[in-house]
Image (tube, grey):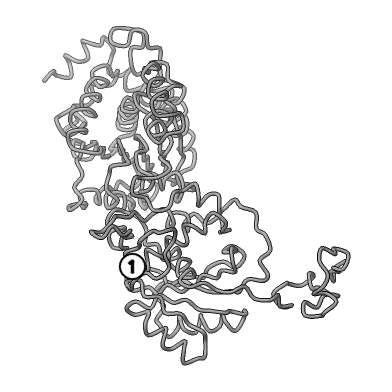
């Protein structure tokens, strides 16, 4: 290992000048990267500096530091070959070297990826780094050469283990800087993301979290950075064809082979998430269309509610109203930790406030008690047993059980359904995957399996699905359903003179005209 003196002599730059430069770029990663390496020389011949997308990310870190006490979280989804790992190395070297006693962790999709790709790339940039004299790169860490700070000023290359996530729980550094970097983030287990979250709680710390990778999966924690938790993350999609040094001919071949809008090209070239996994039950496009769809009046349809009963932990109890294809106008009610008797009161209160034709209840397990109680209170209740046999075939499709059936009916209804612009509901609708059992029947993924792969329990979506457990006949319009200011003043649907009239728009008079 070269001594500090040897390294200083090799770079022909006084230590004092290097230290002063590090101080100048401590809050400016853009200036750091532009001056930290010998661009257009030796190994970097032909490279004058960062690509535009890399500069954009560095600028976000720079500008984010202007808000003290707020974590700077950036997620980058991209195609292949754009220089993601180079950016990771620059952020590591800048973040660690410009703030005393910085602590950090970098991990990747797999241990071989971390050791053979990330560390190899870091070794290259560290060798070219103007301030390398102050640090030492070992097989598993980048640490300060100052013996008094080797434990407090370091970044560890740490493989993750889903069964031992606690290694990511101890990253605290109040009043200083914290680096957390996930490379190929889409393959990192949800429990690692969850364990790492508390780093944001350190008082007055500069928290820098970079997650990047190819967007290989249509759901999961990496995609959540762009949607469900998009209010906390700064996000960027990078098309490989926009980067100067990528292989454009290969991308053209892929596009010709698979199609510009194929999931293969989306995940490997354009940096967009796939529309559906091969086993995803409901694709995001149909959900997004249901969110955007213009709501048409459905006054003649009966109002029904679906009730999903929480069983334990973080699960929610949900009351979801639907009138025909309108699952938007009356928003669902959610409750956490509510006992059955209190949930019963909420259902009864809703039914008293609205003209509810049927209450569909997931009567499996603890939901059975709610079914019995609501029936004793003279409500029309349909007991939906998720594990029961399917009884509503759809175009010859065979369902393994009632839950798969009602989700299938809901999926079909999404062609016409209107739902609220709610990211939690959206994530739950697209979250479940499916398989075929030995009888060739579609079987929906259980909630506990979804949780293990980091997808939220679909409590709200289950409540909506229960409303499709039985067909409801369309009812005649009732005045109280129409709403204030829209009551028909000259219309009696049962009057003979009106029954015989068709298409006479002049016969309609509204109270607000």
Is residue 498 toward the left or the right of residue 362 in the image?
Answer: right
Residue visible at 40% across and 45% down in the picture: 276
Crowding near pointer 1: few (<14 within 10 Å), some, many (20+)? some
Q: Nearer the viewer, residue 303 or 81?
A: 303
Q: Position of residue 304 (x, y in %)?
A: 55, 74
Compared to residue 216, the image places residue 231 above or below, namely below
Is residue 127 toward the left or the right of residue 242 in the image?
Answer: left
Residue that sits furthest to the left in the current view: 1
Is residue 394 toward the left or the right of residue 422 in the image?
Answer: left
Residue visible at 33% across and 53% down in the picture: 198
Q: Quadrant of residue 445?
A: bottom left
Q: Position of residue 348 (x, y in %)?
A: 53, 84
Residue visible at 40% across and 40% down in the picture: 274
Q: Nearer the viewer, residue 113 or 365?
A: 365
Q: Nearer the viewer, residue 260 or 151?
A: 260
Q: Position of residue 260 (x, y in %)?
A: 46, 29
Q: Position of residue 324 (x, y in %)?
A: 59, 67
Q: Quadrant of the C terminus?
A: bottom right
Compared to residue 41, the image places residue 188 above or below, namely below
Residue visible at 40% across and 17% down in the picture: 248
Q: Nearer the viewer, residue 162 or 318?
A: 318
Compared to residue 58, the image places residue 445 above or below, namely below
Q: Quadrant of residue 436?
A: bottom left
Q: Quadrant of residue 97?
A: top left
Q: Which residue is mark 1?
A: 401
Count of numbered tags = 1
Q: Quadrant of the N terminus?
A: top left
């Amino acid at each position: 290992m070269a001594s500090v003196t040897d390294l200083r002599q090799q770079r022909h730059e006084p230590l004092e000048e290097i230290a002063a430069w590090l101080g100048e770029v401590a809050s400016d990663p853009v200036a750091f990267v532009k001056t930290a390496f010998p661009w257009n020389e030796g190994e970097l011949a032909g490279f004058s500096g960062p690509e535009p997308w890399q500069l954009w990310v560095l600028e976000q870190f720079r500008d984010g530091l202007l808000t003290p006490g707020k974590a700077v979280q950036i997620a980058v989804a991209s195609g292949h070959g754009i220089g993601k790992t180079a950016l990771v190395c620059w952020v590591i070297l800048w973040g660690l070297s410009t703030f005393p006693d910085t602590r950090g962790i970098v991990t990747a999709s797999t241990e071989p990826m971390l050791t053979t790709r990330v560390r190899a790339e870091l070794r290259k940039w560290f060798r070219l780094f103007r301030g390398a004299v102050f640090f030492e790169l070992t097989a598993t860490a980048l640490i300060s050469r100052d013996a008094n700070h080797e434990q407090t000023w370091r970044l560890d290359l740490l493989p993750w283990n889903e069964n031992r996530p606690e290694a990511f729980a101890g990253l605290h550094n109040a009043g200083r800087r914290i680096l957390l970097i996930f490379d190929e983030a889409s393959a990192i287990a949800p429990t690692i993301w969850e364990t790492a979250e508390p780093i944001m709680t350190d008082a007055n710390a500069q928290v820098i979290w970079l997650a990047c990778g190819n967007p290989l999966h249509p759901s999961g924690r990496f995609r959540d950075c762009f949607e469900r938790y998009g209010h906390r993350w700064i996000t960027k999609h990078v098309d490989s064809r926009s980067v100067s040094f990528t292989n454009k001919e290969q991308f053209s071949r892929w596009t010709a082979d698979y199609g510009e809008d194929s999931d293969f090209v989306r995940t490997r070239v354009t940096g967009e998430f796939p529309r559906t996994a091969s086993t995803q039950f409901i694709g995001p496009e149909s959900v997004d269309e249901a969110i955007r769809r213009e709501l048409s009046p459905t006054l003649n349809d009966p109002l029904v509610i679906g009730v999903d009963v929480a069983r334990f932990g973080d699960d929610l109890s949900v009351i979801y109203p639907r009138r025909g294809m309108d699952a938007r106008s009356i928003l669902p009610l959610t409750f956490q930790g509510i006992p059955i008797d209190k949930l019963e009161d909420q259902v009864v209160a809703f039914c008293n406030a609205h003209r509810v034709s049927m209450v569909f209840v997931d009567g499996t397990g603890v939901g059975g008690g709610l079914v019995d109680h609501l029936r004793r209170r003279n409500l029309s209740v349909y007991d939906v047993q998720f594990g029961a046999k399917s009884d509503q075939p759809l175009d010859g499709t065979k369902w393994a059980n009632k839950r798969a059936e009602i989700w299938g009916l809901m999926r079909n209804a999404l062609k016409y359904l209107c739902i609220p612009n709610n990211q939690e509901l959206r994530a739950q609708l697209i979250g479940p995957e499916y398989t075929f059992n030995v009888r060739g029947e579609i079987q929906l993924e259980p909630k506990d399996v979804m949780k293990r792969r980091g997808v939220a329990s679909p409590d709200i979506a289950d409540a909506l699905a229960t409303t499709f457990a039985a067909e409801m006949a369309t009812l005649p319009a009732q005045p109280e359903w129409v709403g204030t200011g829209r009551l028909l003043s000259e219309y009696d649907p049962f009057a003979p003179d009106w029954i015989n009239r068709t298409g006479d728009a002049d016969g309609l008079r509204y109270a607000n005209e």
